[in-house]
Image: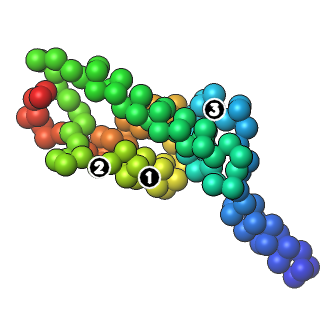
Amino acid sequence: MRRLGVLIAATAWLWSTSAHAVSTDDFLIVDLQDVIDVCTTPESDPMYAPAIAFCHGYLVGAYQYHVALHAGPKAKPIVCLPDPPPTRVQAVDQFITWAKAHPEYAKDKGVDALVKFLVEKWPCPKDAAAK
């Protein structure tokens, strides 16, 4: 019985630490878990370069869309990056760390989770005006 417990524990540990091989289906991005999978593709994966490029493109595009929605002279932005802003790599790394810490959002749309992160990490002051 003890061996079974050790086997189950070892299997669970290996499962949680094993690298997920990325496939082209992962690029469809249905939910936040798909974003995490693509953005954490290991360097040893043959799809590493396209996955990381896609990850950054997806997240930057989603952020730029959010910025465009909140642009204009009467806009009331909800995300205010610090000055100087984080680098793209820093922001992506912070988002992925946040996403992994919030498994309750794993089935949310990736864009929705990104906005939750941005508002939590860099909220605008109540009296913020569009630049």
| Residue 74 against residue 32 in the figure, above or below | above
The amino acid beneath tag 1 is Asp
Where is residue 44 shown, x and y percent of the image? Answer: 69, 55
The part of the image, by quadrant, that contains residue 52 is top right
How far apart are the alpha carbons under marks 3 and 1? Answer: 18 Å
Asked whether 131 or 74 is in front, the reply is: 131
Q: Is residue 26 left or right of residue 32?
A: right
Identify residue for label 2. Answer: 86
- The residue tagged 3 is 27
Please state the horizontal and vertical placement of residue 19, each as a whole percent of the image.
Answer: 70, 56
Percent position (x, y) of residue 24? 71, 32
Instruction: Name the residue tied to disc 1.
Output: 93
Mark 3 to mark 2 CA distance (whole Å):
25 Å
User: What label sits on residue 10 in the rendered view?
Assistant: none
- The answer to the question of whether label 2 and label 1 lie on touching residues, with beta carbons closer than 8 A, is no
Q: Please, what secondary structure does the residue beneath circle 2 have? A: loop
Q: Residue at x 8, y 34 (%)?
A: 127
Vertical comparison of 96 with 31: above or below: below
